[in-house]
Amino acid sequence: MVSTIFAYGQTSSGKTFTMSGDANAPGIISLTITDIFDRIASSADSLNFSLKVSYLEVYNEVVNDLLSPENTNLKIHEHMTRGVHVGGLTEESATCPADVQSIISRGEANRHFGGTNMNERSSRSHTILRILIESHRKSDKRTGIRVSCLNLVDLAGSERAAHTGAEGKRLKEGGSINKSLLALATVIGKLSEKGGDRGHIPYRNSKITRILQPSLGGNARTLIIATVTPSSGFVDETISTLQFASRAKSIRNKPIVNEITNSGKAIHMIAPLHN
């Protein structure tokens, strides 16, 4: 099953802090990693697990591998069994929370940040931390391997040049961020339309919507955290964020369990789950 968590909102509204936190207040990512390994430990008597981690960013509509910074401009592919995925992305094994945190720290060192009038350390790219978990029963080798994929997404925030004071490189980054967030809002708007015929869903208008296509309208459970600022100077941005959240809330996905047969040649979709 695919699960995704991401925060959405204007720049400097707390998205990165919500996802990453700090030493005194762990964020969604740290809490999730701890919970994953707690659950693995509680099932260790009956199940074998393997866990792999990848970390990418979408910067100015270019997909980069944060764990191998020489891997840039990666391509997005669609496979019959793997679905939509980024080709050539580094995957590293992890056996404990410290392993995952170490991988994240290495990736963060390669991520694009920059200062603006609104945020001295503003995210200039969208990032996706992907955790792939495989499990199978110890007692019955005839059973297949169950596969779960968790995407933890830190979106860069929408911004206005008049507020951020962006010029040159920062202005280009802000334009790319806003364009991709507009594409995301358009996809959410189309998916939230009532009725059976939604028409064309423009996932390909942005790299972030293309990569997250299975999470937005397919076999997935997705949690969106809307972040807003209490400042009265950003009422329009707050209203826009809440409208996005309202539309997203009306979308209904139908996640199902992914199981790979022992032959490794097919993936069976079993046990439908109601979202």
Image: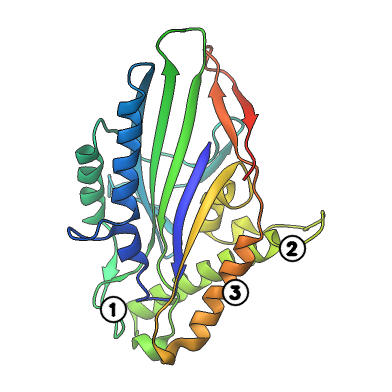
Q: Secondary structure at mark 3?
A: helix
User: At which x and y percent is residue 265?
Assistant: 56, 18
**Quarter-wise, where is residue 164 in the image?**
bottom left
What type is the residue that disc 3 sits on? Gln
Marks 2 and 3, how far apart at CA: 14 Å
What residue is rendered at 57% in x and 44% in y?
220
What residue is rendered at 52% in x and 12% in y?
143
Give the crowd class for mark 2: few <14, some 14-19, many >=20 residues within 10 Å.
some
User: At which x and y percent is residue 116?
Assistant: 29, 81
User: At which x and y percent is residue 53?
Assistant: 34, 38
163 relative to 273, above or below: below
Residue 30 makes an appearance in the image: yes
What residue is rendered at 60% in x and 61% in y?
205
Asked whether the beta carbons under mark 2 and mark 3 sit within 8 Å of each other, the answer is no
Residue hosting label 3: 243
In front of the other: 34 or 233: 34
Q: Name the disc covering residue 193, or none.
A: 2
